[in-house]
Amino acid sequence: MAKGAKRELWKLYDNGKCTRKVCPKCGNAIFMAEHKDRFTCGKCSYTEMKK
């Protein structure tokens, strides 16, 4: 890691509950990325638009 680089950890659980959305096609182990207007799975490219 480069000197002065910032390292962030993802927050997956809050009070024992998962904070990330799980992909309905891939199963429990795959989380979906949250974008401004959609959720996307990086493995199977499944996309859900936000309402």
Image: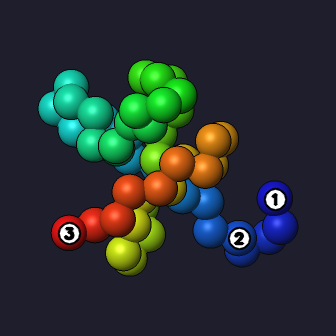
Report, in whole angstroms, how far the alpha carbon at label 2 lies from the one at label 3.
36 Å
Label 3: element kind: loop
Mark 2, residue position: 5
Amino acid type, mark 2: Ala
Q: What residue is drawn where x is 72% and y is 74%?
A: 4
Residue 8 can be seen, yes or no: yes
Q: What residue is drawn where x is 28% and y is 42%?
A: 19
Q: Residue 39 or 46: which is nearer the viewer?
A: 46
Q: Position of residue 17 (x, y in %)?
A: 21, 30
Q: Position of residue 34 (x, y in %)?
A: 42, 61
Residue 33 can be seen, yes or no: no
Q: What residue is drawn where x is 38% and y is 57%?
A: 48
Q: Position of residue 50 (x, y in %)?
A: 28, 66
Mark 3, residue position: 51
Amino acid type, mark 3: Lys
In this view, the residue farthest toward the right is 2
Please tell me which of labels 3 and 1 falls first in the chain. 1
Label 2: element kind: loop
Q: Is label 1 in contact with label 2 (beta carbons under 8 Å)?
A: yes
Q: Is residue 2 above or below residue 36?
A: above
Of the residues tagged 2 and 3, which is closer to the observer? 3
Q: Residue 35 or 19: which is nearer the viewer?
A: 35
Mark 1, residue position: 1
Q: Is residue 28 above or below residue 24?
A: above
